[in-house]
Amino acid sequence: MYINVLGAGLAGCEAAWQIAERGVNVRLYEMKPNKKTPAHKSNDFCELVCSNSLKAARLESAAGLLKYEMRKLGSLLISVADGCRVPAGGALAVDRDIFSSGVTEKIKNHPLIEVVGSEVTEIPDDAVTVVATGPLTSKPLAEKISLMCGGELNFFDAAAPIITAESIDTDCTFTASRYDRGEDAYINCPMNKEEYEIFHSALVSAERAPRHDVDVMNPKVYEGCMPVEILAQRGLDTLRFGPMKPVGLRDPKTGHRPWAVLQLRTENSEKSMYNLVGFQTNLKFSEQKRVFGLIPALKNAEYVRYGVMHRNTFINSPKILNADFSMRSAPNIFFAGQMTGVEGYMESASSGLIAGINAVRRLKGMKSIILPKETMIGALSDYVSNSQTKDFQPMGANLGILPPLEINIRDKRERAAEYAKRSLECIDRISEDI
């Protein structure tokens, strides 16, 4: 007996690991390195293409709660991420290369996982199958999935630039984490009012890279991955209340909060490369260098990777999937990852974890495991499978999708702590059965 897993991204690798750890053979299909998309650079599995941040680590946060639940359920990806984290204040950020190579080594060395290096153009019908081909599913397979699911929804994703550490003008920066949470993990690039307005004017008028598969003026993208130039068009202060918000930061050189701040987050353990946080973009490469160079700290920046936009795909899951991530019309086929409409790296991995567990249970004729909606994983599973949902859009971990607490707590932090306490009680009760 074996189970197919299509795609060796975060969801696929997590699903394959969960299946193999339960004593079932896995055939893991991955088209890299024979075929890559424009967003892929590495030959390794689980390549992080948009950011190296896996979001907040604090238990009293939606993202932190999700990761804690995954740890309790034996997540491979959380284990690897914990071993290659880099400073990021209150967030769990990783060295991209070490993370990908670490997951790849674990997967390839598992005795029950067979890696098949070829592109899949059909969904196999000879075994239980987990489809985790991700937001960059190749066109032939995407067309087959579209037919099977009665149509597909497309959106576009953007990645932020990466620059070298040595090219940052440190005379124009200060290190700090917002609200002094954690170590001083971010390099902050402050701007005064005049500098910001000059930058904003250049950004909204800058030339964008041409694409034939997307309206570059009004792309359909996640709000969380909106190109910075599109955000800037919404108003002069939009960036100051978004990726360039100065709240919780104070420039030691002036003693005051800056007018606007670009934060830089380290990309690797050597701290030789930094990511422009929240600066996903579709500007031409020359325009990125010109416009972002108006930020004083980046006037001489050297780019390791310019920002890019690429195609993503997700299905209308509420009409297609059960809460265990299996298809209603074909129960032996499971979907996992961003294709299901979960937004974010760890959200994708968590769906792979649940899909993998339930694929094994389906193979063995056992009842599916569906986590309570009081847990973050359970709430996300419910969100993507709720047949009453209209105008379905991707969703990341957030406290708003959890059922309300029985008691009214006004303090935001206390309320988050109570959500976390309730979730952990649920996970502790059921984790032994999983």
Image (cartoon, grey):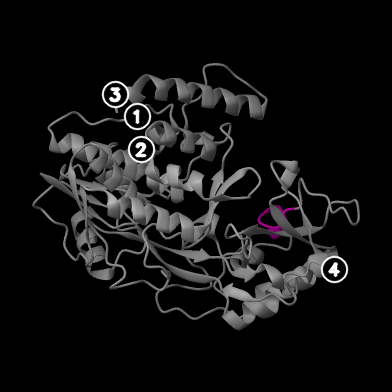
Name which residue type carries label 4. Answer: Glu
Marker disc for residue 433: 3
Relative vertical location of residue 345 with respect to residue 362 in this rendering, above or below:
below
The residue pinned by badge 1 equals 371
**Of 194 and 112, which appears nearest the observer?**
112
The numbered mark, 2 or 1, whose residue comes first in the sequence reads 1
Q: Badge 2: few (under 14), some or many (20 or more) residues near its Cα, within 10 Å?
A: many
Q: Amino acid at mark 2?
A: Ser
In the rendered structure, the answer to whether residue 210 lies left or right of residue 433 reads: right
Viewer-nearest of discs 2 and 1: 1
Q: Which residue is painted at 63% across and 49% down in the image?
A: 88
Q: Which mark is residue 381?
A: 2
Question: Residue sitting at 63 percent across and 42 percent down?
Answer: 90
User: Please, what secondary structure does the residue beneath circle 2 have?
Assistant: helix
Dot 4 corresponds to which residue?
A: 194
Image: magenta residue range: 239-245
Label 3 sits on a secondary structure element that is helix
The question of residue 399 being in magenta is answered with: no
